[in-house]
Amino acid sequence: MSLLEIRDLHISYPNPKGEFFAVDGVDLTIEKGEFVGLAGESGCGKTTLALSIPRLLPRGSHIGAGSIHFNGVDTTALSEEGMRALRWKEISVVFQGALNALNPVHTIGSQIAEPIRIHDESVSKKQAHDRTLELLEAVGIPARRFEDFPHQFSGGMRQRVMIAMALSCMPKLVIADEPITALDVMTQAQILDLLRSLCDRYSLSMLLISHDLSVLAQTCDRVAVMYAGKMAEQGPTSRVFGNHGAKHPYTQRLLSAYPNIKHERKFIDGIPGYPPDLSQEQVGCRFADRCDVALSRCATEVPELIDIGGGQSVACHLASDIRAGVQ
Amino acid sequence: MSKKLALSIEDLHVTYQLNGASGKNKVARAVDGVDLQVAVGETLALVGESGSGKTSMAHAIMRLIDPSAGKIVIDGVDVVPLQGKGLRSMRRNFQMIFQDPFESLDPRQRVIEAVMEPLEIHRIGGSESERREMALAALAQAGLRPAAEIGERFTHQLSGGQRQRVAIASAIILKPALIIADEPVSMLDVSLRAGILRVMADLRDQLGVSYLFITHDLSLAWMFADRIAVIYLGRIVEEASAVDLIANPMHPYTKALVSVIPVPEVTALEDRIILTGEIPSPASIPSGCRFHPRCPLFRELGEPEQCLTQDPVLQIQSNAESHHVACFFSEHNKGNQ
């Protein structure tokens, strides 16, 4: 049994035009101890998908269909009380804006210790204190900084505090939503290394959300790429970023939008056009308008996410044709 | 001097007086003696982490803050002593593109008005209709077509990429000698970045615009710029052609930065040099070489006295054309001593 199994999930928000279908039939699986990257550009639905797991979606959002099985339990069927028992203890989140998420008038030590005692009343103050020191050590913050306030920390150190907080109740799954976006390259490398080592040390499962595919290439076991509310492609990092390569035209175009210093210097490519308006009903492949290898059927038939072997799956008519040709 | 210079910075210093409880009467030396030159039609990327002084430098060049010492010569004129009217009239010669296109434009303004505004300020163009024509041409050059239609929209109705194009149009309409672009694509989605950079590159090729391209992203600097200068704690530590700097970094700081550049493929993680700690405060710059507390080479060499006591200057490496490094023990030095 996988730790997390999302099947055919649909999530929509009300908007002035009616309804906005942010996530429109998405599958995602995370195994125990697995480090999964979720990539895509603004508005692709990656944050909505991720926040549906601990059910932290904004008011008004609506899970229309599908299931989210966590440790064998369908959380979409759980009451708010049942969900609260999972949140933080089993599934925790490292949020994007570390400065805004921390309370400026409490020491970082007390902020890490707080969830420990809230979620387990049997823990004594002393035990929570000891556990906090242990967590500080694990995320690379010197113990002497226990009594310091958030404003005394740099962006990178605050992100470490956020990670310590997320680990405070020893969850099974940590969701990190763009945890390194506002940080410098060297600090990014430090935080990614930290996440990777914590994942290995505590056998955590990690879902790392990033708009930056190149960052995921070096950290994750597996990567999933979303486009316009759908999963475009997913597979082991070694395949998608390796010799085998990405098979969805969107993933391919996205990869060529990054400069690659390991290759010859050339101007990066963009992707002309814009993603479709998800408050409208979608026909065919959502990427077809921007795709330079689209077939006529792409305009009318929705491509299913198809297993092309090696754990890689692609939602593209071309990829399924390649597979059919091989067999 | 054979090349005509769009920008020449000589021994620039920017200091801030700190008055907080923790820093009474302390001085932060944000820019601490920088020399830089940008030739006409050239793009120089200034690369550094936050706290490196790169934004202070941009603001000093734009004269948004006053430097404490040094010269900033733009198109042959030192702009540091200029004040009031003299500075205002000189300003048309250097323009800035800011990082956040959502904050740099007035949401209540129509696009065409935003682009015409610099012309009005500098009293360029004989009539309203002439200015309108110039603004439409600038919008089209920035890739906003049909310019007449987009010109009538309000800036808040535009996407991030379109807004950044409006900012580019407003910057080029005065035909400046120098454009300072401060992280112009870092807020945009990856698929939109190429479009903005392509417009900037076309302006360089067609109009001979010179850029000071400020970024934290070394791989983008490598792709876009002719030369790269790496800044650390207010000082340039290495400067070379973009290709040479990435292929053959000589300063230990640059080496580490290059080693952690994310690339969209599977790479060997063991080759990365991850520095510990963070960039120190410019209010307490370490003695000797300012990089020594974080320098892997300093430790590897058994903490040489020189690094602790002497401040290395940016020196040309004799084995590489116009490759400058501020390190006593850069690869070249090691090989020849």
Image (tube, coloured by chain):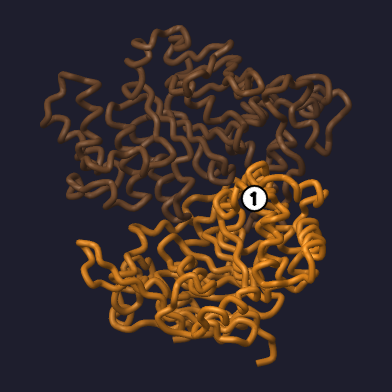
Chain colours: A brown, B orange
The residue depicted at 61 percent of the width and 72 percent of the height is B44
The residue depicted at 47 percent of the width and 24 percent of the height is A58
Q: Which residue is label 1 attached to?
A: B109
Left or right of A57: which side holds B188?
right
Q: Give the total of numbered labels.
A: 1
In front of the other: B98 or A124:
B98
B61 above or below A14?
Answer: below
- The chain identifier of the residue carrying mark 1 reads B
B152 above or below A228?
Answer: below
Q: Secondary structure at mark 1?
A: loop
Q: Is residue A170 visible?
A: yes
| Residue B170 quadrant | bottom right
Left or right of A293: which side holds B229?
left
Q: Amino acid at mark 1?
A: Gln
Left or right of A150: which side holds A259?
right
The image quadrant where one finds the C terminus of chain A is: top right
Q: Is residue B320 visible?
A: no
Residue A67 in the image: state x and y as whole percent: 53, 12
The residue depicted at 42 percent of the width and 14 percent of the height is A71
Left or right of A283: which side holds A17?
left
Residue most toward the front? B127
Residue A192 in the image: state x and y as whole percent: 44, 44
In front of the other: A301 or A194:
A301
Circle 1 residues within 10 Å: few <14, some 14–19, many ≥20: some
In front of the other: B33 or A2:
B33
In front of the other: A276 or A201:
A276
The residue depicted at 37 percent of the width and 27 percent of the height is A92
Residue A242 in the image: state x and y as whole percent: 64, 42
